[in-house]
């Protein structure tokens, strides 16, 4: 059976899976709860706990699980799964790389860690403007929610400027937590690339240096990468 977990923050759903999960468990409990939540929120966080007496899925339940995953493909912001089931602990991380949202697996002794991970910010985007120089700092591991919060700030920073000098600070950036976050990042480039005159990328990882070439494929602005130790040189170059 599937039972709901009620003591969770707004926008977060929780479910406990017990015994053998059937199609009726999805149809009567999980699916209606998801539908109600997504009527109120663009995306939700979910906590799924497979407790000690979990015995797997019936064929019908497996099909319902697949349908729900496809139907709500972009409806999740983050998913935490609590389980000691070996095949799920090993299989979920492999599947997660193809999902548009971050997924993390916790052991049955770690439910509080799972709740904490769902509630904490994975990363943030800081935006500032000085004359025609807009500085954007990407910090930590960014999920789609971080972009949702920053999009208005970035639009306001670009407003009224014809030829933005963009300083993109990546030194504390650990990458994107899910394909949805990467999609939001590319969407920002698409929306604002015509307004950008020059881009300075500052970072300390090899893949960040490769971003210099990748960025030049999306925008026509002059782009240059600087190591974090040369951040002062980036400040001078972007203002030239």
Image (cartoon, grey):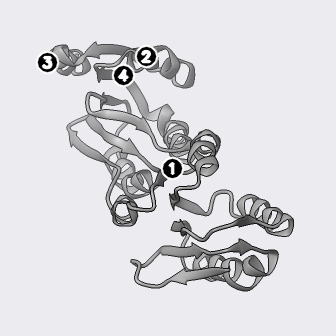
**Callout 4: 10 Å neighbours few (<14), some, many (20+)?**
many
Per the image, label 2 sits on a secondary structure element best described as helix
**Callout 3: 10 Å neighbours few (<14), some, many (20+)?**
few
N-terminal-most mark, 4 or 2: 4
Say which residue appears at 45% left-offset and 62% top-offset.
108
Mark 3–mark 2 distance (CA, rounded to whole Å) = 18 Å
Mark 2–mark 1 distance (CA, rounded to whole Å) = 26 Å
Q: Quadrant of residue 117?
A: bottom left
Give x and y (percent) for residue 206: 38, 14
Mark 1–mark 3 distance (CA, rounded to whole Å) = 34 Å
Mark 1–mark 4 distance (CA, rounded to whole Å) = 32 Å
1 or 4: mark nearer the eye: 1
Q: Say left or right for 217 vs 10.
A: right
Q: Which residue is mark 4?
A: 198
The quarter of the picture where the C terminus appears is top left
Per the image, label 4 sits on a secondary structure element best described as strand
Residue found farthest to the front: 53
Q: Which residue is mark 2?
A: 212
Q: Is residue 98 positioned above or below 155 on the image?
A: above
1 or 3: mark nearer the eye: 1
Q: Say left or right for 32 vs 12.
A: right
N-terminal-most mark, 1 or 4: 1
Mark 3–mark 4 distance (CA, rounded to whole Å) = 16 Å
The label shown at residue 232 is 3
N-terminal-most mark, 3 or 2: 2
Give x and y (percent) for residue 220: 51, 20
Give x and y (percent) for residue 190: 55, 37
Say which residue appears at 61% left-offset and 51% top-offset.
88
Mark 4–mark 2 distance (CA, rounded to whole Å) = 12 Å
Q: Which residue is mark 1?
A: 102
Observer-nearest of 73 and 27: 27
């Amino acid at each position: 059976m599937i039972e709901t977990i009620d003591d969770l923050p707004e926008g977060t759903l929780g479910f406990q899976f017990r015994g053998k999960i059937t199609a009726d468990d999805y149809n009567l409990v999980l699916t209606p709860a998801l539908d109600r939540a997504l009527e109120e929120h663009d995306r939700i966080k979910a906590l799924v706990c497979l407790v000690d007496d979990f015995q797997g899925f019936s064929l019908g339940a497996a099909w319902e699980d697949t349908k729900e995953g496809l139907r709500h493909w972009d409806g999740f912001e983050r998913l935490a799964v609590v389980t000691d089931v070996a095949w799920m602990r090993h299989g979920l991380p492999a599947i997660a790389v193809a999902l548009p949202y971050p997924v993390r697996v916790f052991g049955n002794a770690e439910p509080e860690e799972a709740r904490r991970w769902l509630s904490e910010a994975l990363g943030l985007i800081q935006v500032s403007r000085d004359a025609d120089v807009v500085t954007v700092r990407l910090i930590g591991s960014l999920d789609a929610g971080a972009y949702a919060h920053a999009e208005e700030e970035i639009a306001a920073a670009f407003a009224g400027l014809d030829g933005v000098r963009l300083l993109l600070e990546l030194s504390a950036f650990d990458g994107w937590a899910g394909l949805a976050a990467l999609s939001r990042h590319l969407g920002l480039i698409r929306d604002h690339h015509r307004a950008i005159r020059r881009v300075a990328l500052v970072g300390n990882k090899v893949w960040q240096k490769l971003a210099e070439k990748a960025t030049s494929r999306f925008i026509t602005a002059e782009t240059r990468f600087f190591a974090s130790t040369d951040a002062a040189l980036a400040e001078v170059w972007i203002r030239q």
